[in-house]
Image (spheres, grey):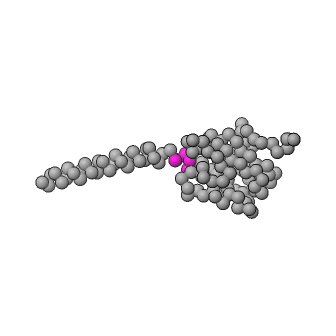
């Protein structure tokens, strides 16, 4: 009877280990990139002056930044667009934006933002007539 109880405990431990491993691989790993993208965008937020609180929704404790205002993501919850037009922001763009591997569009029309150019991205030129 005792040997059977140990065997049940062992089986339970193995099943628990398998379930935890599956959860880590299937559920949590896809969010690792989203979290690094959120961290990159939050670094940008911290480098900017935001007197109108337009970046207030940029909360790094959320699973990914896809629910943040001014952010658009693809079906894989990866950031593809950052639209900061008419946001009254000032400060510096940060090199961490390079971590947004699927970023295709970054728009800001504020001359008070400084920093590295975002080469290779589609932008909207507000000076076109």
Give the tally of numbered discs.
0
Q: What x and y, as percent, mark residue 86?
A: 78, 53
Residue furthest left as drawn: 1
Residue furthest right as drawn: 129
Main SS of residues in magenta: helix
> Which residue range is magenta in the image?
31-36
Near-viewer residue (47 or 83)? 83
Q: In this rendering, would 103 be left or right of 129? A: left
The residue sitting at 58% across, 56% down in the picture is: 60
Near-viewer residue (19 or 36)? 19
Quarter holding the N terminus is bottom left
Quarter holding the C terminus is top right
The residue sitting at 76% across, 50% down in the picture is: 85
Q: In this rendering, would 92 be left or right of 71? A: right
Q: What x and y, as percent, mark residue 78?
A: 59, 44
Near-viewer residue (79 or 120)? 79
Q: What x and y, as percent, mark residue 108?
A: 76, 49
Q: Is residue 68 within the magenta segment?
A: no
Q: Is residue 12 above or below residue 125?
A: below
Near-viewer residue (1 or 94)? 1
Q: In this rendering, would 76 be left or right of 117? A: left
Q: Is residue 32 within the magenta segment?
A: yes
The residue sitting at 61% across, 45% down in the picture is: 73
The residue sitting at 30% across, 48% down in the picture is: 15
Residue furthest top as drawn: 120
Residue 90 visible here: no
Q: What x and y, as percent, mark residue 28?
A: 47, 48
């Amino acid at each position: 009877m005792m040997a059977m109880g140990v065997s049940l405990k062992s089986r339970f431990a193995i099943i628990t280990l398998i379930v935890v491993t599956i959860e880590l691989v299937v559920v949590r790993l896809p969010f690792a990139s989203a979290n690094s993208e959120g961290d990159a965008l939050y670094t940008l937020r911290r480098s900017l002056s935001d007197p109108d609180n337009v970046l207030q929704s940029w909360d790094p404790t959320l699973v990914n930044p896809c629910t943040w205002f001014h952010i658009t993501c693809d079906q894989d919850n990866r950031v593809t667009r950052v639209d900061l037009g008419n946001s009254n922001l000032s400060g510096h763009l940060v090199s961490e934006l390079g971590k947004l591997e699927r970023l295709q569009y970054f728009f800001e029309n504020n001359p008070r933002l400084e920093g590295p150019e975002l080469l290779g991205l589609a932008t909207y030129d507000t000076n076109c007539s």
